[in-house]
Image (cartoon, coloured by chain):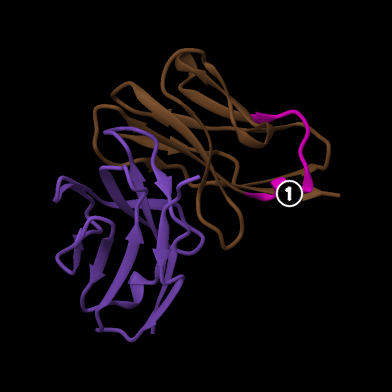
Amino acid sequence: AQSVTQPDIHITVSEGASLELRCNYSYGATPYLFWYVQSPGQGLQLLLKYFSGDTLVQGIKGFEAEFKRSQSSFNLRKPSVHWSDAAEYFCAVGARSSASKIIFGSGTRLSIRP
Amino acid sequence: EPEVTQTPSHQVTQMGQEVILRCVPISNHLYFYWYRQILGQKVEFLVSFYNNEISEKSEIFDDRFSVERPDGSNFTLKIRSTKLEDSAMYFCASSEEMGDTQYFGPGTRLTVL
């Protein structure tokens, strides 16, 4: 079955500290992988995506993610977080072969400690 | 930068009534989607739409739900006989090509009383 697991429901880090949000997926076809961010009361903004090629992808706002096929993971990282990074982060998976759905993880809520 | 827009931002309706949620996808996109997010839960796929036909729908998308592209710019989700459990944030998304990045609108919060 296709699924995305984000094992951390809520993470709190200090401003300026590094961040890693975990994401594991289960998908039969070659996956396309995404990270979206949702600020309170807002829509979903694309942070970055992996389709093919270099397994380390850079996104907006200083975020990066690394695709590790052997571990079925696509963890999101940022070397130094800012208070404005506080939001809900969703990992998602799709497929080029499908004209259809993206499957979302349950999300990780990030809080920033001053 | 082009973006997906949705109206209204918040819709309140009585149980049993019909609602229409509206979306304007990015202009050169050909694939359209609706998702919903019940408060505190994950984002769930409802339906995808291409070439004036539904490509795929989830089990959530029962016969009370319908989608339409009434003109060259709008994409609508209609819910008939609304239920309390339809209360959620509804997101529209669009993509340029099959399997391509989906860009999401800001959402419509539907409250069924």
Q: Position of residue A105 (x, y in %)?
A: 46, 42
Instruction: Determine whether the residue tagged by mark 1 lies in a helix, strand or loop.
Output: helix
Q: Position of residue B45 (x, y in %)?
A: 32, 50
Give me the residue at 48% from left, 64% from top.
B39
| Callout 1: chain | A
Residue A61 versus residue A86 in the image, above or below: above
Q: Which residue is mark 1?
A: A84
Return the residue nearer the eye: A5 or A48: A48
Colour of chain A as rendered: brown
| Amino acid, disc 1 | Ser
Residue B70 shown left or right of residue A40 in the figure: left
Return the residue nearer the eye: B85 or B67: B67
Give me the residue at 39% from left, 72% from top.
B87
Give me the residue at 75% from left, 28% from top.
A79
Return the residue nearer the eye: B102 or A66: B102
Give me the residue at 44% from left, 30% from top.
A33
Q: Position of residue A90 (x, y in %)?
A: 52, 43
Q: Quadrant of residue B77?
A: bottom left
Residue B54 versus residue A40 in the image, above or below: above
Colour of chain B as rendered: purple
Q: Quadrant of residue B69?
A: bottom left
Q: Is residue A79 shown in magenta?
A: yes
**Mark 1 neighbour density, 10 Å: few (under 14) some (14–19) many (20 or more):** few
Q: Is residue B49 shown in magenta?
A: no
